[in-house]
Image (spheres, rainbow, N blue to C red):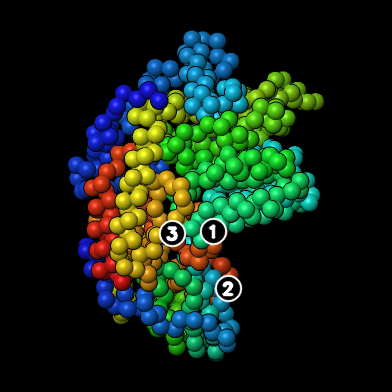
Amino acid sequence: MSLNDLYQEIILDHGKKPRNFGELETATHEAEGFNPLCGDQVRVRVRIEEGKIADLRFSGHGCAISTASASMMTQLVKGKTVDQAVALVEKFREAMTSDSVGPEGMGELGCLSGVKQFPNRVKCATLAWHTLRSAVTGGGKVTTEKPDA
Amino acid sequence: MGTQAVDLSSVKSEFPALVQATAGKPLHYLDSAATTQRPESVIQDVDAFYRTHNANVHRGVYELSQLATEDYERARASVAAWLNSPSPEQVVFTKGCTESLNLVASAWGGTNIRPGDRVFVSTMEHHSNLVPWQVIAEARGAELVPIPVTDGVELDLSWLESNLDESVKVVALKAVCNVSGTVNPIQEVARLAHGVGAVVVVDAAQALAHQKVDVQEWDADFVAVTAHKAFGPMGVGALYGRADLLHAMPPYQTGGGMVRGVSFERTGFAEIPDRFEAGTPNVGGAVGFESALKFIQRVGIERIGAHETDLAEATRQRLQMIEGVQVHGNAKRRAGIVSFTLDGVHPHDIGTVLSEQGVAVRVGHHCCMPLMERLRIHATVRASYSVYNDLSDVDALIAAVQKAKEILA
């Protein structure tokens, strides 16, 4: 596993120019996520219309891995139903933590497969996802220490 | 100090974890501000305690318990002597700085801080010397006031001088900043604080392995130290306290070992320091703490401090030559710690690249979130040096930062 596999061009691109970044004034749901170990913070704001994610944005500060993962996540789930989005969160979480599957089947997110070789960075990649799930299933605060709280 | 001229270029060979690591992939250990490595002598002394003198301390009438008790109290006397405490009983063993500071905030602060009082805590404080004061201030109806720091991470002494008044009960300050390496003027702060009757609580976590800690020269009222940042074991530290203050303080935790007599009607508490040491203490840890101080004495604290500072200064100079690198903090007096950021790159990503080059640094807020806010950053990369580092570690760090810039910037 080389650093160039971890920090692929596409990750650096999303890290420096995140898509769907900023505030969403028309949000109907939102949640905040924290990684208390590094102080990283993300806020995900979502507008749900008729059970679908009509729009979403994220804000905050984090490393290239967490920013890129959040950016790609917003692209993937926009237009999906809440149930589909929650299923994708679970799929991504599984992909980042299981030995048998990876994120390769999830489009651009496949570029994050290298993160699994750096166990202390997996939480960076999953923070925004846990936060999205919290936002669409009721809102609140999540931390990487208790992602399911 | 009577040093036997230990050769600094070979001292690394006394640290098994570094020797073992070097046998495989290179390890440039630049995280000694988080915890130092331990020399063979400390590991052996702790091992010997468990092999030869292991028993619970106090009240055992058999020989083994007496040996353990002697070890424990000798360790206390050694720590007290090292800190220049007027007496061993003014040194309370704890599990580290955090517990020492919680003990002061809870037992001293809980009885001496009153509604309307003010508690001064520096903006550069580690959370361990901030949160306990915040909690006790809130509980007692007092006000927590940050002492400002300059852009270069120096304490704003003129602010302190003009804002101290009789309402201030505590001035809490670290001796050496774990982010910027700033060495704070404890003596000067103590003089100002004592002028209005405030007590001075010093977090000396980063100072113990870097400079002589002399509680009387500092004229500090409470000083917290920990062994593991000074070549000793984890899970043991100490609190030095002024005798009259300690004598007047209620217990911090209660239970066995800290009582004079117990009945269901009432409990009489033991004298200091036992009053503050409920439960079985970390005897093996105390033995290791004493051993660590022997190691420092053998090498020479002034030599260790100067060596670390030299390496940190070389690091600063070379980092500042890399375009886009910002070094945080430029206090006039600094220890062997350097914090920096690289424009447009998050410290965590730098840390990962450095790690792949065998360079172990710490990235994040270093438990100093208010200081990060003051510096308008979220995190830094921190390199911290100890006696076993040399210029090859600086070279490796600089090369790895260049590589990180290449990949990430």
Name the amino acid type tagged 3.
His
Q: Secondary structure at mark 2?
A: loop
The residue under label 1 is B150
Quadrant of the rendered image containing residue B202: top right
Crowding near pointer 1: few (<14 within 10 Å), some, many (20+)?
some
Name the amino acid type tagged 2.
Gly
Name the side, left or right, on which B228 lies relative to B56.
left
Name the amino acid type tagged 1.
Thr
Q: Secondary structure at mark 1?
A: loop
Q: Secondary structure at mark 3?
A: strand
Between residue B77 and residue A111, name the one nearer to us: B77
Asked whether residue B137 is in view, the answer is: no
Placement of the N terminus of chain B among the 4 image quadrants = top left
Question: In the image, what residue occupies the spot 62% across and 53% down?
Answer: B158
Q: Are marks 2 and 3 on the same chain?
A: no
Where does the image place residue A45, in percent across and percent down from the top left?
A: 53, 79
Quadrant of the rendered image containing residue B220: top right
Where does the image place residue B259, in percent across and percent down from the top left?
A: 68, 23
Q: Nearer the viewer, mark 2 or mark 3?
A: 3
The residue under label 2 is A139
Q: Is residue A120 above or below residue B233?
A: below
